[in-house]
C-alpha cells in the first residue's frame, strides 16, 4: 500500500505543504529534494498522516473478453497480453477485475505514510488523501505475480483508475507494471 500511495496518488499524502512546491520550484531536482524533506518529516510524525478511505461499495466495469479481442487499438492488445500471461482463461481474470475485494477491511492494511480507514468512518479532524477501491486479486499459478484494478478518487474531477501487475520479491509485493484505464 505504501508504494501505491507514494508513487501513484499525486503526493497528496504529503499534505498542504506539497501543494506549493510546483509553483515554487521550476527545477525538478530541487522539487524532488523538497519532497524528500517532506517525506522524512512525515515519517517522524504520524500525527501528520492524512487518511485514505477504503471504499468497498461501487464496482469497476471491464468489458467482456470478446470486446478486447475485436478491438484493434494498442491498449486492448496490451490488456489481452497481460491478462493472458496470468491464465489460459482470460475471461476469468476480467471477471475478477470486475469484483471489488471484500476480504480485507481498512484495519488489515498498514502504511507508514497514511492512515487507512473504512469509507464509513469519516474523520473531519484530519485531511483526506482520497478514497481507494481495489478489485479482487488474481494470482498466477506460482502465486508470485498478481493482477488487480484500483481506483483512486481525490475529488469530483480528480483521480485515476489503473490495472496493476504486482510481483513478490523476497518478502514483499511491489508494483511491476501499470496500465492506465482512466484519469481526470
Image (tube, helix red, strand yellow):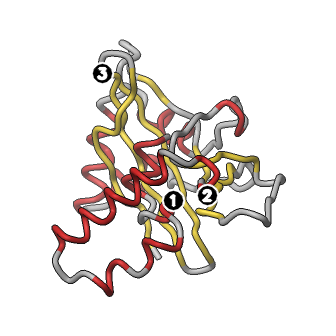
In the picture shown, does residue 47 fall above or below 144?
A: below
Task: Examine the rendered structure and indicate whether residue 75 appears above or below residue 156.
Answer: above
Q: Determine which of the numbered discs, if any, sits on residue 73 in the image.
A: none
Q: Which sits in the foreground, 112 or 91?
A: 112
**Residue lying at the far top of the rendered structure:** 142
Question: Residue 61: image x %, image y %?
Answer: 58, 56
SS category of the residue bearing label 2: strand
Question: What residue lies at 37% left-to-right and 34% top-to-bottom?
Answer: 166
Q: Residue 137: x percent and y percent? A: 52, 32
The CA span between labels 2 and 3 is 28 Å
Given residues 156 and 11, the one toward you in this image is 11
Identify the residue at image location x=49%, y=47%.
149
Q: Is mark 3 on a helix, strand or loop?
A: strand
The residue where tag 3 is placed is 169
Disc 1 or disc 3, which is closer to the eye? 1
What distance separates the C-alpha of mark 1 from that of mark 3? Answer: 25 Å
Q: Residue 13 carries which label?
A: 1
Per the image, the residue denoted by label 2 is 50
Pick whichever of labels 1 and 2 is earlier in the sequence. Answer: 1
Label 1: state its secondary structure: helix
Q: How crowded is mark 1: few (under 14 residues within 10 Å), some or many (20 or more)?
A: many
Amino acid at each position: 500500500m505504501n508504494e501505491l500511495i507514494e508513487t501513484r496518488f499525486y503526493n497528496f499524502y504529503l499534505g498542504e505543504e506539497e501543494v506549493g512546491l510546483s509553483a515554487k520550484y521550476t527545477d525538478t531536482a530541487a522539487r524532488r529534494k523538497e519532497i524528500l524533506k517532506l517525506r522524512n518529516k512525515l515519517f517522524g510524525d504520524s500525527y501528520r498522516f492524512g487518511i485514505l478511505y477504503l471504499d468497498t461499495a461501487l464496482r469497476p466495469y471491464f468489458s467482456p473478453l470478446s470486446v478486447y479481442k475485436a478491438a484493434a487499438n494498442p491498449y486492448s492488445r496490451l490488456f489481452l497480453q497481460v491478462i493472458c500471461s496470468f491464465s489460459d482463461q482470460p475471461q476469468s481474470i476480467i471477471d475478477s477485475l470486475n469484483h471489488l475485494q471484500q476480504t480485507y477491511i481498512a484495519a488489515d492494511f498498514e502504511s507508514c505514510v497514511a492512515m487507512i480507514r473504512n469509507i464509513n468512518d469519516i474523520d473531519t479532524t484530519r485531511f483526506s488523501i482520497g478514497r481507494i477501491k481495489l478489485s479482487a486479486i488474481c494470482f498466477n499459478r506460482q502465486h508470485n505475480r498478481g493482477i488487480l484494478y484500483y481506483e483512486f478518487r481525490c475529488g469530483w474531477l480528480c483521480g485515476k483508475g489503473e490495472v496493476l501487475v504486482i510481483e513478490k520479491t523476497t518478502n514483499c509485493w511491489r508494483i511491476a507494471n501499470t496500465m492506465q484505464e482512466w484519469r481526470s
